Amino acid sequence: MTIKLACYSIVSKKSTIEEKYRGGLASFTKSYSVWGLTQDEHLVKISFMSIDDIYSVVDEIVGCGLGYDRAKNQSNDFVIADKYTGPFWNVDWLEFGHKECWYK
């Protein structure tokens, strides 16, 4: 199944959230349901209208256990994506198309 991207999105594998995020998927969905949370069988996405909002949420999810290399501005635990230009970095578990993404 495909996940439609918002202007800006953070996308992660559900298995990564369950394994690494403090409180697992249930806690993640509760915390970010106000951010236009969408999920399919493999992925979870939170949506943003402004790039400014993303980095405060990145700080939160990293504080709850997800990995992120600030120097390289990348992670294998999640991806930030723009619906028009695609991912800010590539990961081997996610494919991008026109305004959408899906699990490989």
Image (tube, grey):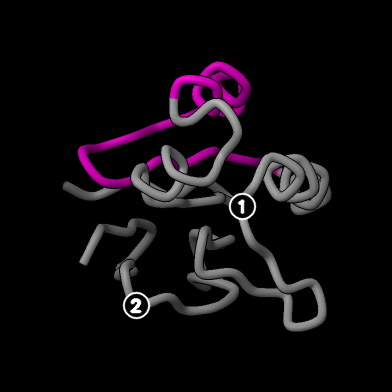
Q: What residue is shown at x 65% (from left), y 47% (from top)?
A: 65
Q: Is mark 2 in CB contact (under 8 Å) with mark 1? A: no
Distance between the Cα atoms at labels 2 and 1? Answer: 17 Å
Q: In this picture, is 32 found above or below 11? A: above
- Residue type at mark 1? Leu
In the rendered view of the protein, which quadrant contains the C terminus?
A: bottom left
Q: Secondary structure at mark 1?
A: loop
Q: Give the magenta range.
A: 26-49
Question: Which residue has dot 2 on it?
Answer: 92
Q: Nearer the viewer, residue 13 or 89?
A: 13
Dot 2 lies on which element? loop
Q: Which residue is mark 1?
A: 66
Q: Residue at x 76, y 40 (%)?
A: 60
Question: Label 1: how many residues lie within 10 Å, few (<14), some (14-19) or many (20+)?
Answer: many
Q: Name the residue: 51% across, 60% down.
A: 77
Location of residue 103 with respect to 43 vertically, above or below: below
Name the one closer to the observer, 102 or 91. Answer: 91
Q: Residue furthest left?
A: 1
Q: Amino acid at mark 2?
A: Asp
| Residue placed most toward the observer, 22 or 43 | 22
